[in-house]
Image (spheres, rainbow, N blue to C red):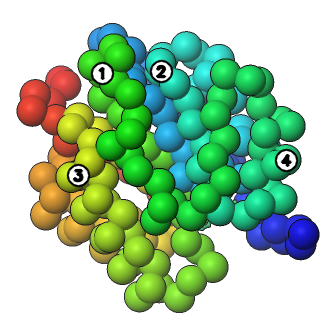
Amino acid sequence: MTANLLDIKSPDWALDVIPTILGKRCTGKYSAFVDVGCGSAARVLKAVNEMNIADCVVGIEAHGHTARLAVLNTPDNIAIVNCDVRDFSFSNIEKNSGGPVAIYLYDPFFRLERGEQIYRYAMLLERIAQEVGDATIIFLTYCLADPLDVILRDLGFVRSEKIKPSTSPTLCVWDRRSLHAA
Ligand SMILES: C[S@@+](CC[C@H](N)C(=O)[O-])C[C@H]1O[C@@H](n2cnc3c(N)ncnc32)[C@H](O)[C@@H]1O
């Protein structure tokens, strides 16, 4: 069991901004909030969970030890799934409230070289577009905002927010719905 030495956590400002943005984007509740690569502290999951804006809150974490720490660090109503996101089926998410599914990605593939990262994102986003009806994607990324823009637009997503602090990663919010919120 090796430690995840690159267990990087979302910056503090994102913990305030993400629940606020999600609250603004959806008048009812989200069916689910999913953090792809939730890390050991699962900070974003906990911040969203406290707002009670999603029926279920799920963290996917590929690294076994990190996933176990995430389980210890989160309340029981947050589900931590220890798997590679490539093996996670978004179509199994129950949509009791009928609300959109919000998916958070903070550079989960950062250890891969740039071309491989873009390829992984393209595969993942295509699957999300197929498996999830109404989706909101929140991206926090250091250098992939532009190439991901192209992929997301091609898949029918519309960008609603772009926040680019000078020394922090860029945060972008994308919606794919039959009816886009104002
Ligand atoms: C930059 S950290 C983000 C941590 C957390 N989301 C946060 O915002 O604080 C990325 C996480 O993604 C995980 N990860 C990397 N590849 C993954 C994959 N294919 N499937 C699921 N998790 C993955 C890493 O182990 C790491 O914990």
Q: Which residue is mark 2?
A: 54
Residue appearing at x 26%, y 48% in the figure: 131
Residues marked 1 and 2 touching at CB (< 8 Å):
yes
Which label's residue is closer to the chain start, 1 or 2?
2
Residue appearing at x 47%, y 21% in the figure: 54
Which label's residue is closer to the chain start, 1 or 3?
1
Q: Is residue 179 left or right of residue 118?
A: left
Q: Is residue 6 left or right of residue 25?
A: right
Marks 4 and 1 sit apart, C-alpha to C-alpha, by 30 Å
Residue appearing at x 36%, y 63% in the figure: 124
Q: Quadrant of residue 146?
A: bottom left
Amino acid beneath label 1: Gly
Q: Foreground: 66 or 27?
A: 66
Amino acid beneath label 3: Ala
Marks 1 and 3 sit apart, C-alpha to C-alpha, by 15 Å
Marks 1 and 2 sit apart, C-alpha to C-alpha, by 9 Å
Q: Which residue is mark 3?
A: 129
Secondary structure at numbered mark 2: strand
Label drawn at residue 99 = 1
